[in-house]
Image (cartoon, helix red, strand yellow):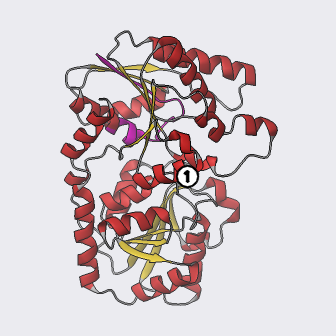
Amino acid sequence: MNIIFYEPQCSGLSHVDVNSSYIQLCGKVFPGHNMIFFGENEHIALIKKSLKDKSLNVLFIPVSIISGKTSRIAKIYNILNIVRSVIVYSTNINDHIIILSINSQTLIAIKLYSVIYKKNIHIIIHGILETIIKKPNRILGNILWFKNCLGILNNKYIKYIVLEHYIIKNLLSIIPNMEKYTHVNNLPFDLAKSSIGVYRENNTSKILFISAGYATIDKGSHLFFKLAKECFEDRFSNNIEFSYIGKTTSIQNTLIGRDCVTVYGGNSAVDMGIYHKMFLKADYIIFFYPIDSYKLTFSGVFHDAVKYEIPIIALRNELFSFYFNKYGRLGWLCDNYDELFDLVKNLSVSIDISILNEIALNFKKFKLDYSDDKQILAFKKLFN
C-alpha cells in the first residue's frame, strides 16, 4: 500500500510544519508503508529538513506550482497533467491519496479523475473555504468560485477534511449537501509533548506584546501597529514593547506606527529560528482578526500561541469563542478595539498571577486533546 501526498499550492516555507506533520502522522498510522510526496522543489527540501523521523520511507517527486501568470489554456493543461500524474501513481486499490491544499481548478480535475480511475481521495481544505461566503464580481470568477466547484460533481471517491467542528457546522449552513462528504480532523501536531510553560525567556524589564503571520488588512494586522503607536502616544509604554513576526509587504504602505514596532520578517519570510525565539520571549500575543472572520478556517498562528502557551488577547470571533468555551480561559476576548486598547494599558501596569495560572492550566487541557494517541486514532477513522 502507498500513501500519496500532493501539495498543489504551497511553495517554500508555506505550510511546511503542517505538511511534514501529516507525513509523520501517516508514518505512525500506516507503519512500514511507502509514502510519496508530490510538491514544489524548495518546499520539498524544507520538509525533508523538518521531518523528525528520518527513518520514514518517503519518495519526493518535484512538480511545478501553477503560476497565476500562466495563460488560461496552459494553466488548465498543466493542472490536468499534474493531477493525472498524481492519481495514476496509485496502482493498488488500498492506496490512499491525500491532497494537502486545494483550489477550484485542481478540485475539478481531481473530481473528474477520481471517477475515471476509481481512486479514493482525501482533500484537506484550509483557508480557501473563507472564499465561499462572498460571491465574486467577475463572470469568470463566478464560474470558478470555490463554492460552486465544491458543491458539484461530488462522488463516493471523495472525502473532504476540515480542521474543526465549528467549521463543518458553518460550511453546512452554506452548502447543505456537503454533509455526506465532509469530515473533521484536527491539525496533526502532537501538542501534548510541547510543554513550554507560561513563564518563558523574556528576562527583560519590559512586557512584550507580539502579533504574527502574513500581514493583511483582512486579518486586521495594521491595527497592531496602530495600537503600538497609540500606546506610545498615551505615554504608558515605558515598560512595554511590540514586535511583529511575519511578512508585512502587503500592508507596508498603509502602516501607521511602523516605528513603534520591531518587525521580524518584513519584506521576506521569517527565519523559523527567529520565529521560535520570539514566541518564547512573548508575554502576550494579540489577534485583530475581524469579528466575522475565521468562520470557515483555522489559524496557524493561534495554534502556535497554544503550543508556546502565550496568553491570547483577541477580538471576539467564532474561532476564539469556540476554543475559550471548550477549554476555558486562554487569555482575554474583547468586543472592540477600544476595549482591547484599555486591556493592554491595564496589563502594562499589573497582572493577577492567578489568572496566568488559570490560563496555563487551560493550555494544558487543550494540548491533551492533541496527543499522539488521539491523533492516530482520529486519523485512522478517516480511512475506514
Q: Position of residue 25 (x, y in %)?
A: 27, 35
Residue 185 % position (x, y): 36, 44
Q: Which residue is mark 1?
A: 173
- Res 147 quadrant in image: top right
Secondary structure of the residue carrying tag 1 is helix
Q: Amino acid at mark 1?
A: Ser
Which quadrant of the rendered structure holds the N terminus?
A: top left
- Report whether 377 appears left or right of 85: left
> Which residue does the image show at 34% across and 58% down from the upper left?
277
Q: Is residue 356 visible?
A: yes
Q: Nearer the viewer, residue 125 or 197?
A: 125
Q: Residue 49: percent from the left, percent from the top? A: 33, 34
326 on left or right of 199 = right
Q: Residue at 29% across / 37% down in the picture?
A: 379
> Which of 64/2 is in front?
2
Instruction: Specify whether residue 227 is painted magenta.
Output: no
Count of numbered circles in the view? 1
Which residues fall within the magenta stretch? 1-21
Residue at figure coordinates x 68%, y 32% from the top left: 68
